[in-house]
Amino acid sequence: MAFVGLAMAFVGFLIAFGSLGLASSASGRLILVLIGIVVSLAGIMGPLNQAYQKKAVWKR
């Protein structure tokens, strides 16, 4: 699950970074950047967080 979360965070970064070349208008770039941020946060807060919660120090 950690790899899925990392992949989602990286894809979100690529969406946000790729908006520079994909959209020429400011509103188009803004929408793509917001989509990238949402995908990154979903990857970090979803699968990546759950994977690290399973091996938490305080659960030993």
Image (cartoon, rainbow, N blue to C red):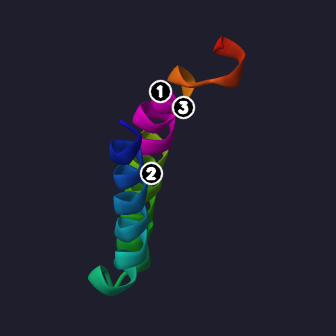
Rate crowding at label 3 as few (under 14), some (14 to 19) or many (20 or more) other CA atoms within 10 Å: few
Callout 2 environment at 10 Å: few (<14), some (14 to 19), or many (20+)? many
Name the one closer to the observer, 48 or 25: 48
Which of the 4 image quarters holds residue 24?
bottom left
User: Image quadrant for the C terminus?
Assistant: top right
Say which element carries label 2: helix
**Marks 1 and 2, the one that precedes in the sequence:** 2
Q: Residue furthest top?
A: 59
The label on residue 40 is 2
Task: Name the residue carrying label 3.
Answer: 52
Q: Secondary structure at mark 1?
A: helix
Magenta stretch, main secondary structure, is: helix
**Do the numbered discs 3 and 1 sit on residues whose CB atoms are within 8 Å?**
yes
User: According to the image, label 1 marks what residue?
Assistant: 50
Task: Pick the residue in front: 35 or 10.
Answer: 10
Front of the two marks 1 and 2: 1
Q: Name which residue type carries label 2.
A: Ser
Magenta stretch holds residue 45: yes
Disc 1: CA contacts within 10 A as few (<14), some (14-19) or many (>=20) = some
Give the image location of residue 28, x and y in percent: 35, 71
Q: Please, what secondary structure does the residue beneath circle 3 have?
A: helix
Q: Which mark is residue 19?
A: none
Q: Find residue 12 and report its image quarter.
A: bottom left
Q: Which residues are magenta?
A: 43-51
- Residue type for callout 3: Tyr
Residue 31: percent from left, percent from top:
38, 62
